[in-house]
Image (cartoon, rainbow, N blue to C red):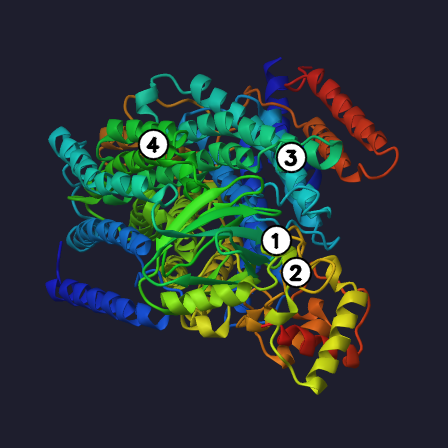
Amino acid sequence: MIKRPGSLRRLLVGLTALSLLLLVASCAHNYPQTTLLPRGDFGRMVDKLFRTTVFWAAIVFVLVEGALLVAIFKFRGRPDDPEPRQVHGNTGLEVVWTMIPAFILVMIAVPTIKTIFKTSSYAEGDVVNVEVIGHQWWWEFRYPDLGVVTANEMHVPVNRTVNLRMTSADVIHSFWVPQFAGKRDLFPKKHNPLWFKAEVTGTFTGQCAEFCGEQHGRMGFVLQVQPQEEFDAWAASQRVGSPLVNAGRVDSTQMPARDAAADSLEKAGQAAFNAGGCIACHAMTGTALAGVLAAKGPNLTHVGSRSTIVGGMLQNTPENLARWLSNPDSVKSGVLMILPRKLTSQEITTLVAYLRSHR
Amino acid sequence: MATSVLEHAPAIHQEKSGLWSWITTVDHKRIGILYGTTAFIFFLIGGIEALIMRLQLMRPDNHLVSAEAFNSLFTMHGTTMIFLGVMPLSAMFFNYFIPLHIGARDVAFPRLNAFSYWVFLLGGLFINFSFLLNAAPNAGWFGYANLTERTYSPGLNTDFWVLGLQILGIASMAAAINFFVTIVNLRAPGMKMLRMPMFVWMSFITQILLLLAFPVITVALVFLMMDRHFGSHFFLPEGGGDPVLWQHLFWIFGHPEVYILILPAFGIVSEVLPVFSRKPLFGYTAMVFSGAFIAFLGFGVWSHHMFATGMGPIADSFFAISTMLIAVPTGVKIFNWLGTIWGGSLQFKTPLYFALGMVAMFIIGGLSGVMHSSPPADLQQTDSYFVVAHFHYVLFGGSIFGLTAGAYYWFPKMFGRMLNETIGKAHFWLMLIGFNLTFFPMHFLGLNGMPRRVYTYAAGSNFEFWNRIETWGALLLAFSLLLFVYNVVSTMRKPKTAPADPWKGATLEWLIPSPPQEFNFADVPPVNSSTPAWDLRRAGGGQLPEPKRVSGAGIHLPSPSIWPVVTACGVLGVIGSILFTHMKGWFVITLCGAAVLLFGIYRWAFEPPFPEEH
């Protein structure tokens, strides 16, 4: 009953143009967390598999939706048309269209299973070992071989495989750096593997991908991919006062020299830090909790060196730190950090100076 | 004596009205309408929850709602749409049309049917009541332990969720047993299993899924309740429990649940396409067996929801292949629908629009489903907006489009009035456009790194463009639903002028007046094929006489009963009492609930099922 072949063609052309437009507009370059431009081997393997499925899906999509559109335009009827031929089925045809999808699925299944076996376990060889511990709602990264404990900011050397051993301190979280690898969940009292090799340097972001309570949306972190020397220098500076090295105790010779005025402000900050209850949850060099690994909050020994605070939510500036200390719950509702009382602005100033001096 | 029977007859079969008659009704058609109305209201509530979320996500770092409120919104949106929206909307069609399709007078257990409805209503009200206490569930619709344990969710929020689902599960189980028995036992003479309408077949398979899947979530919910209230530690790693166990139990229920949501829509579309193509369903037997195969495989794929949990390569491979296999019978269904319309004489009425829309949208959801059947690829997609896009294409694009096709198709049968075609088509186009604007960009967002269930996102992530488009799409979608409401309300004010068979239907319900009389069929018509109404029409030279309303004298119908309602209240009392375990003497509430429950069952059991003969 096709009356206007032109309209069908116009529709198809229009639809194709529209989908192209959508694809262009979705251009991955603009998205810092995109999975579509993998910057590491794990991500590339996954992406290749994804592209295989998209390839077959696109063929099926065009053929099946095309057939549907053709049928819709071709078989328009009127109420007074004679009854069409009453076809009940066609065994041959039905066998064929059962076999074709099965064939396509085999084309997807074979590379899938190959990739499953490559991506399921720990990496071996020359790797950087990192222990990832999820907390409500921040990330702890430990480098057992390097003696580094840090939070919300992971440093890795470029072109070396990073081997992650992941667990959770409370509920289930999921570690996701979309540019480099897929997700894997973190369970309490269990360890899960993940590995990736970053192939470009730069600063990237990742975030928790399993709903983990009120601030799941603000459980992000920063991934710094650095040249090996830069990474080594970073690790060396982070070792100083780390709970994993010498129980957090530091030789005074290792401390940088400071001018007297700043020093007195920091001294006051340290007093506030000790007296104000911060040490109940935060490991910090030079305090009673210096060597404690099981503290509830992030290890603050090198907090001044991190680019962000509060689970990747705020840039690490004096203003943001002061804002955070003045009322954590107004910045991130439900956060588990509890101040013993409202801090005075004087206390906040000294604490900011104290914390920022720990680089 | 004969005179006295005739005098008596109209009194029995008079159309009853008034609130009491609705509360005590055991008529499957009235219960169907109750299910439909209630579910549609819950569906609108779930839609409003979605709109608030879309407005919150319209711009980065937005503060329209708090993190806590957003978490409640997505939890309640998912829970509502699945358990209070789509499932009971399907139940409306089961109730109203399974008996009519198979030529039965009612369901097998009419009072149990009423009980199912009232338990469903009370369960839905119970969960939503939490909003009034500012304690709406907030741990996600799949309630992953150990986040849902008391340590991490100390409030009543999760209790409302656990207990509410437990109540709703009872409604689903009772209904599933009822429809299973109805379909097995009450078919008209001549209606062999392989002559049942495809909607009845898909409903039948759905009941089997319900019967096998709901006990699993019941067990999981009991475990979680024990953990939260009575000191066990099924899911607490500190006590030797395992949170992964919850995931397995939940998804052994949860994946068949997906087919519970979609198979009724498959059935509706398989009814609508042949009627409006004026051509029988292509490959009837293949459709039956593909449906059964989907259901069977549906129990062997649950762990594809858990590819990121690190199950190991063997388990990942097994569940990848079983998941891919499901695409084969699903493909068969789609090809058979194409085969049905191919060569037909398509009558472009609103039901056909929605049925074709369902096929077109479900294809997209099916293809994205194949994309995450591959575990390594799924590691990027799971828990991202890509998955949100996928399941809305199958649940909205599939289930809701299919159910809407059913609503337009069967509205004249249920209410004796034809919905307005122009508004219906406008509804379709706006819904199609709004739906795609809302959900298609989610594919892009997910692949570009936006996780699901985040209450906001940082400005630098560049997610705002597509999120804004999605929000406008969602508003358009909401507007299209308002058109539907307007269509229904304005149509209901018009007189009942719809003919018995406005679409030249193929199945038995079109042989009786619209709306049907209380007893459905005065005489059960002959059934010699899966399209009995077409057979009669052909025998009549293309015409069917308009059926007359008859007195129905001498037809026994079950009496109305209040005891299903009382029993349902007892169920609510017993299960709801767990909310109060922190109070001393809380079990008194349990005992009171149990007393009501037992009293209800006792009176129900000794109530004569039919009016006593005088």
Res. A213 mark: 1
Res. B224 mark: 3
The chain letter for the residue carrying disc 2 is: A
Circle 2: is it few (<14), some (14-19), or many (20+) Cα within 10 Å?
A: some
Secondary structure, mark 4, is helix
**Would you identify the image quadrant in which residue B161 lies?**
top right
Residue A184 locus on image (x, y percent): 44, 48
Amino acid type shown at disc 1: Gly
Q: Are marks 4 and 1 on the same chain?
A: no
The answer to whether any part of residue B78 appears in the image is yes
* Disc 2 to disc 3, C-alpha distance: 45 Å
According to the picture, the residue beneath numbered tag 4 turns out to be B318
Label count reads 4
Secondary structure, mark 2, is loop
Q: Nearer the viewer, mark 2 or mark 1?
A: 2
Residue A99 locus on image (x, y percent): 16, 34
The chain letter for the residue carrying disc 3 is: B
Circle 4: is it few (<14), some (14-19), or many (20+) Cα within 10 Å?
A: some
Outermost residue toward the right in this view: B584
According to the picture, the residue beneath numbered tag 2 turns out to be A249
The chain letter for the residue carrying disc 1 is: A
Task: Kindly identify the residue that appears in the image at 50 percent across and 47 percent down.
Answer: A166
Secondary structure, mark 3, is helix
Q: Quadrant of the C terminus of chain B?
A: top right
The chain letter for the residue carrying disc 4 is: B
